[in-house]
Image (cartoon, grey):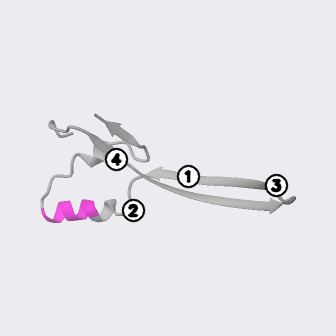
Amino acid sequence: MPHDRRFLIDGETHTLDLNVARGVGTNAQIAVRVPLRWRGGGFLDGLIDKWHQVFGLPNGDRPSFVENAFRVEA
């Protein structure tokens, strides 16, 4: 890990909601909401890693970090 890191926020989330609602009167409805949440690395991480490799850029020691985890450091 770099020694001079003031803060780091790393992670990507996706949320998909399925909502079903039915009116049961003039001012009332019944609804069901089913959220599907996913957390993990970005979908462009592979491309970014390759870019760093091709141009000899530091990778931030990315392979040492746990995958599929949202991380906040300060």
User: Disc 2 marks which residue?
Assistant: 43
Lower sequence index among marks 4 and 1? 4
Lower sequence index among marks 1 and 3? 3
Left or right of 63, for residue 20: right
Q: Are marks 3 and 4 in contact (CB under 8 Å)?
A: no
Which of these two is toward me, 29 or 52? Answer: 29
At label 3, which amino acid type do we have?
Ala
User: Disc 3 marks which residue?
Assistant: 28
Distance in Å between CA atoms under marks 4 and 1: 17 Å
Lower sequence index among marks 4 and 2? 4
Task: Determine crowd level at label 1: few under 14, some 14-19, many 20+ residues with C-alpha closer than 10 A.
Answer: few
Point out residue 50 in the picture as x, y percentages from the top left corner: 24, 64
Point out residue 58 in the picture as x, y percentages from the top left corner: 16, 52
Secondary structure category for the residue under label 1: strand
| Res. 9 image quadrant | top left
User: Magenta segment range?
Assistant: 48-55
Report if residue 33 lies within the magenta region: no
* Circle on res. 10: 4
Task: Determine crowd level at label 4: few under 14, some 14-19, many 20+ residues with C-alpha closer than 10 A.
Answer: few
At label 4, which amino acid type do we have?
Asp
Front of the two marks 1 and 3: 3
User: Disc 1 marks which residue?
Assistant: 37
